[in-house]
Amino acid sequence: MLLDVRSLEAGYGPSQVLFGPSFSIREGEVVTLLGRNGMGKTTTVRCLSGLLKPMRGEIWFNGKRIDGAPPHAIAHAGLGLVPEGRRIFANLSVRENLQMAGIRRPDRRDPWSFERVLDFFPRLSERLSNGGNQLSGGEQQMLAIGRALMTNPHLLVLDEATEGLAPIIRQQIWAKLEALKATGLAMIVIDKELDALVRFADRHFVVEKGEIVWRGDSAALEADQNVQDAYLGV
Ligand SMILES: Nc1ncnc2c1ncn2[C@@H]1O[C@H](COP(=O)(O)OP(=O)(O)OP(=O)(O)O)[C@@H](O)[C@H]1O
Ligand SMILES: [Mg+2]
């Protein structure tokens, strides 16, 4: 298992949000966390990336227990985050945003470098000196993904990577994610675009009030109108 989440409990102050979801991801697998607003998807991602310390439960990544570890240690362990809202540094240039994110992994066969990220997102190479705040939404998203790739992740976690983007830009982002999947990169994807997720991902976990209430592959999800009606509001 690349990632193994066991009975995760977490919340904010006195209010508990996650009530013990367990799920795991294999090398090279693409999975989604589905569910309506406020069900705990981002809270799960915050626990995985070290931004929120779980109250109970365990998170195992690449053979190491990482729950409660600080974000930089988890990034070094190989978990790359494209956070909700992108969170690029608005007052740093595109070049600085990318370069400061870099983590080298000498053992890596085909590592991501500054140059390789620019080859992958040519649009960014035209914007290197621009500040994060001068980019379009699509460019900001490319930068957020590029920044995560600079960490040479074993697992890429994308929280609403197409949110607020025009349809044509969303398509471009999905095409890039397909290309990353083809390299064998494992991913957790959270998105509102269910059709795209069904096409793109291998397996799905439906989160409802901080618990996983359904799990299965894309064919099973497409065939199950009940789960779509009950938990996905489609
Ligand atoms: N920083 C916070 N402080 C207090 N409560 C929070 C905080 N962030 C989220 N919550 C609450 O935790 C619950 C789960 O939120 P979370 O952001 O994990 O949902 P989500 O599934 O990612 O939803 P969305 O689809 O809207 O992004 C919600 O009730 C939300 O109001
Ligand atoms: Mg969210």
Image: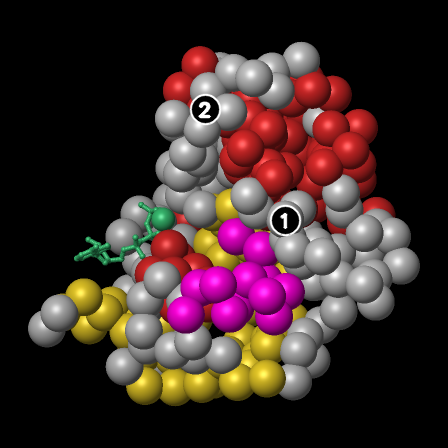
Q: Which residues are magenta?
A: 70-81
- The secondary element bearing badge 1 is classed as loop
Please name whichever residue, 220 or 210, is drawn nearer the observer in this view of the structure. 210
Q: Residue at x 37, y 55 (%)?
A: 42
> Where on the picture, by quarter, is residue 63?
bottom right
Residue 88 coordinates in the image, percent (x, y): 44, 35
What numbered label is drawn on residue 102? 1
Location of residue 77 with respect to 89 vertically, above or below: below
Residue flagged by tag 2: what amino acid is it? Gly
Seen in the image, is 221 located left or right of residue 231?
A: right
Please name whichever residue, 118 or 52, is drawn nearer the observer in this view of the structure. 118
Residue of label 2: 132
Queried whether the magenta region covers residue 74, the answer comes back as yes
> Where on the picture, by quarter, is residue 128?
top right
Q: Residue furthest right?
A: 109
The answer to whether residue 181 is seen in the rendering is yes
The image's colouring method is secondary structure
